[in-house]
Structures are given as structure tokens and as C-alpha cells.
Image: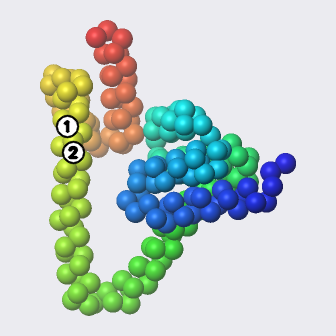
Amino acid sequence: MVEIITYLELFWVFFITNFLGYGGGPATIPLVQHEVVEVYSWMTEYEFIEMLAAGNALPGPIATKMAGSIGFGQGGIIGATLTLIATVVPSLILKILLMNFLVKHKNSPRVKRLALYIKPAIAVLLGVIMIQNFTVAFETIGIFHLIILTLSAWYFLEKKKTHPSLVILGALIYGGVMGMFG
């Protein structure tokens, strides 16, 4: 039987790491690792790395996958539920607070200017991520496969209006087939 204190510790670890881990799931990984491995000894270093690798192989945000896995391992369904809630609540609170501010000041020239400043920053960040992914793909699979995958994805997404999940599935199948024969 899991003690109440364990449930409180599970909630607190994921609440505080997600509150302090500005930058999303990847920013929280070292914080969660420190708490889970070093402070509470819920997992060994190796178990944490294995759980993280498995989580990265699955779709969705890494923070919630870590929370669900660790919470379930320590406290079953209740533990997983608490850690997932603790992971989401900091972002939810911030969004609610910001939304009230933005709605209250939606006609303010300062808020409009702020939104104008944020859009280019987001575009630059997305561009940097795209270049990084392109570089890794080029080094990993080569230019021939990169061109095939890029043109195929563009064709199916833009011209055929195929759902993105089907394009991703097609790329996975392509990679699997090429991996077997290449």
C-alpha cells in the first residue's frame, strides 16, 4: 500500500519541476531526473534513462509521459493521475492568468506590440529547429533519401491534403524498408 506522503511527494516533484522548468518538457528532464534518482531514489540512473528513451520513442509531450510512467511505477493509477495533474497544472495556471490579462488589455497598443514582437521570435525558433533537423537528417540518411522524404511529404501534405499522421506513418514505413535493405 502506497503511503499518503508518497502521493504528496509525487505531486510536489512534478508540480515544482514543471513550474520551474521554463521551456517545456525537455527543460524539466534534468530537474525530474535529479528528484527521482538522487533525492527520492524511486529509480536508478539506468532505469530513468531507459524510461526516457522509451518515452521519446512514443508520440506526445515528454513531460507527461515521464510523469505518467514514474507516477504509475510509484503509486499505481492514483500516482500516475497525480503526477499528470501536477505536470499540467503550472501551465494551466499561467495560461489562465495570461488569458485574463490579454482579454482585459486586448485593445492596448502595448499588448498588440508585444504580440508583434513574439511572432518573429517564434518563426526564428521554428526555423532554427527546421535547420537542425535538416542537418541531422542529411548527416544520418543522406541527401537522396532526404530529398525523397521532403518532396513526398510536401506533395502529400500540400497537393493531396493528406492527414499529417498518415504522412508520418508513410515516412516510418519508408525508413523501415530502407533500413532493412540499406
Residue, x 41% and y 50% (percent of image)? 26
Q: Which residue is mark 2?
A: 130
Pinpoint residue 123: horizontal percent, then vertical percent. 20, 59
Image vertical order of residue 110 relative to residue 13, above or below: below
Q: Amino acid at mark 2?
A: Met
Q: Residue furthest right?
A: 1
Q: Residue furthest front?
A: 38
Q: Nearer the viewer, residue 3 or 63?
A: 3
Is residue 155 visible in the rendered image? The answer is no
Q: Which mark is residue 134?
A: 1
**Mark 1 Cα within 10 Å, few/some/many (few <14, many 20+)?**
some
Pinpoint residue 21: horizontal percent, then vertical percent. 44, 60
Q: Amino acid at mark 1?
A: Phe
Q: Label 2: state its secondary structure.
A: helix
Pinpoint residue 41: horizontal percent, then vertical percent. 64, 45
Callouts 1 and 2 close, C-beta under 8 Å: yes
